Image: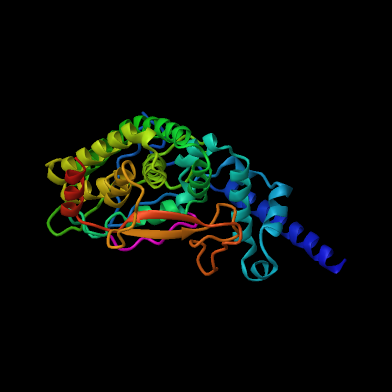
Amino acid sequence: MKYRTHLVLEIVVLLCIGISCIFIFTACDSRPLDSGKAGVPDPDSTSGGNQPATQTPATTPVDQVVDPEIANLAVDLFDEETRKVMPAGMRMRIARDVYTLRNEDTAASLKMLSEVEMYYWPGFPEGAHVVIIPFRKNEGQWEVEAILSNRRVLKVLAECSTMSKEQAGTMVGDELRAALAEYTPMFETKWKSVLRARQKHPVVGTEPYGVGPSLQIGNNPDHSPTLSGLRLKILALMLVAGNLGLSEANEEVALATKMAMEQRERFYTSQEGIEGDRYAMLERAGIYNRQILLTANYGMWSNKFDNKELWENRRLTTFDAQTTPYDRHFPPDFSKGTINVWVHKPCDDQQFDQFMQDRK
């Protein structure tokens, strides 16, 4: 009886926390500040230093509803030991995400991979950015970690692995093609805004790089895709296709690879803008990620990731585990199962080009 009373009190506390969050969110201006929708230009501005000029995440309908089922899940999802040590707000956030994902079918989860917040929460810490073209060997590692930290990606991997390769490949391919079509004009709009901003704020003397672009890292209230969300969705779909050997998506993987290579050529060699802007555009908004491109292309013709000098295996949890390897300060929960993901180790342009040449 005492234990049940304790659980009821804990649920009430979690509901109060959720209500407090609503008050805080609604007291703030949650309008998206980036060109989150195609055809809507963002303000011309550059960001200081070499770090992205991130913007306050927008609220979503889920933020604005305190559902008793989520409050219950914030208790039931976690074992007693974890409930003792994990902050209530963190449990509420995890419960909210798990609740959302449990109510999505596979098609909806594939579509909603463009929701950007789950790539940043819990996400993965970004290191210092060094403006170097060509890219350093480990450039793109953050994107790999951000994708693997996303519980929706874990759900898609698990559910697509239970389908026939033909069905899963068709679904992933269709979603990848649609994402590329939305991403392309948004990418061009963003680059034009960076160039306009650079004309207004040219680099003078030893003035540090004011590197653009700024990118939105919060979801739009109407769930329309953002540039950063579409970019990470494309890379996530490529990683899924390669790991599951979805040859039905081969045409779309080739299309994305071609676009990535064209971006590399353009921003490595173009005289548009300054080098810092070109680097930042390719690194923050482009899809030239060698690790993911190699994983996707290799997976189209082989599923033997057995060369340990080239491939790294990641042991991940299910999407509805109480904790994943990315919920820092807490051990991952493998009690519901394990998902193994292969990723190519960091490599430079020469190694990447050699692989692509050999594949031909």
Nearest the viewer among 59 and 359 is 359
Which region is colored magenta?
121-129
Instruction: Give the percent coordinates (x, y) of residue 187.
Output: 30, 36
Count of numbered tags? 0
Q: In the picture, which quadrant includes the C terminus?
A: top left
* Residue 285 within the segment the image draws in magenta: no
Pick the residue in front: 130 or 49. 130
Q: Quadrant of the N terminus?
A: bottom right
Q: From the viewer's perspective, tell me whether residue 317 is left or right of residue 296.
A: right
Q: Main secondary structure of the magenta part?
A: loop
Residue at (20% x, 49% y) in the render:
355
* x and y percentages locating residue 125 in the rendered image: 40, 62
- Taking the image as shown, residue 263 lies to the left or right of residue 177, namely left
Query: Residue 306: x, y in percent?
Result: 33, 57
Give percent across and percent down for residue 151.
52, 51
Residue at 27% across, 38% down = 193
The answer to whether residue 359 is visible is yes
Q: Is residue 186 visible?
A: no
Q: Residue at x 36, y 42 (%)?
A: 238
Left or right: residue 10 versus residue 358 is right
Colouring convention used in this rendered image of the protein: rainbow
Q: Nearer the viewer, residue 108 or 167?
A: 167
303 and 243: which is toward the camera: 303
**What residue is drawn where x is 83% and y is 64%?**
5
Q: Which quarter of the figure has residue 256?
A: top left
